[in-house]
Image (cartoon, helix red, strand yellow):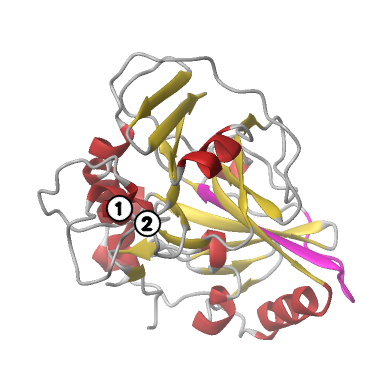
Amino acid sequence: MRAPGIAVALAAGLSVAACAWAAGEPATGPVPSAAALPAGWRWESYGGIEVGVPADFGYDNGSQRLGQWCVGPRPKDADSPPVVGRPGISTAAGCMESVDVADTGPVVSLGPELGEPADGVTRRGDRTTVRLHGVAVIVQVGADLREQIVGTVRVVEGADHQGCLVRHPITDNPAYRPVRAPAEGAVTSVSACRYSLLGSKSIISSLRLDGAAAQRSLDAVRAEPVGGGPDEPRTCTPDVSYGDEVVVLLAGGGEVVVRYSGCDHRGFDDGRTVRRLGVATAKLFLTGANTVFAGAGPALLPGE
């Protein structure tokens, strides 16, 4: 799959996942108030909502894991590795909705609430769904852990736990360029903030690199050749040429925009210079929580 197709296919993935996120049921309780995270847990961010999960949770395609659980040879049962899922490109098999962790494996899924508009909590089978501010947090794990995770769900005002704005100016202006580039010299951290340019136009996920890893990542960006690309403007219309999502890097008091999902304008842009989108460099920021999924694996970047 080439990157120009990500914009269209991801939208399709969201519609396929609607059966998983559109609960369409009355709430059975109030939204819980968030507590402090237990030791060894981490926060996950989506659309202005955060949820805490144990540190051993991996990442997977939320659309595929919940909406397409009947597809593929991968074993999905209560003993399979637990994951955090977000919307991704998925297959379109006619899997019946399952609220049984034995079918889907343990999963905490974050996505748009496409059904019941009211905030609240619904419990069915092994699934508890928290609906809050237009986001659905689906917690489909064992009973004891399920209640712990549900109790961490919270609204984020302004910026998330990685320092990423919930809504960045780029979500309303895909042509946005940073006002300030990262300062020259050493950096101690880089936050990679991934945003949707469609739908909610807010944060999808975030990650942070610290210390030597942060410095190496920014050095890699600065080492990419000047000029931007690789671009394929003839493969899509100008109104969708920026794609459906983008990453904004926060480092050294400045920003770098990472464009990869459209047919045009690809590259690393610090507001002064646009550099080529090197695959290996881009993947430093599109991993973990920021992984773009297609089916059972990561989507391909331009040049792969």
- Give the residue type at disc 2: Ala
Label whose residue precedes the other's in the sequence (1 or 2)? 2
- Give the residue type at disc 1: Ala
Outermost residue, right side: 185
Numbered marks: total: 2
Please provide the residue range marked out in magenta. Answer: 180-195
Q: Quadrant of the N terminus?
A: bottom left
Residue at screen point 84% across, 63% down: 252
**Residue 11 makes an appearance in the image:** yes
- For residue 102, the mark is 1
Q: Quadrant of the C terminus?
A: bottom left
Coordinates of residue 177 in the picture (x, y in percent)? 64, 54
Q: Is residue 123 above or below residue 14?
A: above
Mark 1: few/some/many CA within 10 Å (<14, 14-19, 20+): some
Q: Is residue 207 magenta?
A: no
The one nearer the camera, 301 or 225, is 301
Disc 1 and disc 2 in contact, CB within 8 angstroms: yes
- For residue 78, the mark is 2
Q: Is residue 276 above or below residue 3?
A: below
Mark 2: few/some/many CA within 10 Å (<14, 14-19, 20+): some
Q: Secondary structure at mark 1?
A: helix
Distance Cα–Cα, label 1 vs label 2:
5 Å
Outermost residue, front side: 144
- For residue 198, the mark is none
Dividing the picture into quarters, in which one does residue 52 lie?
top right
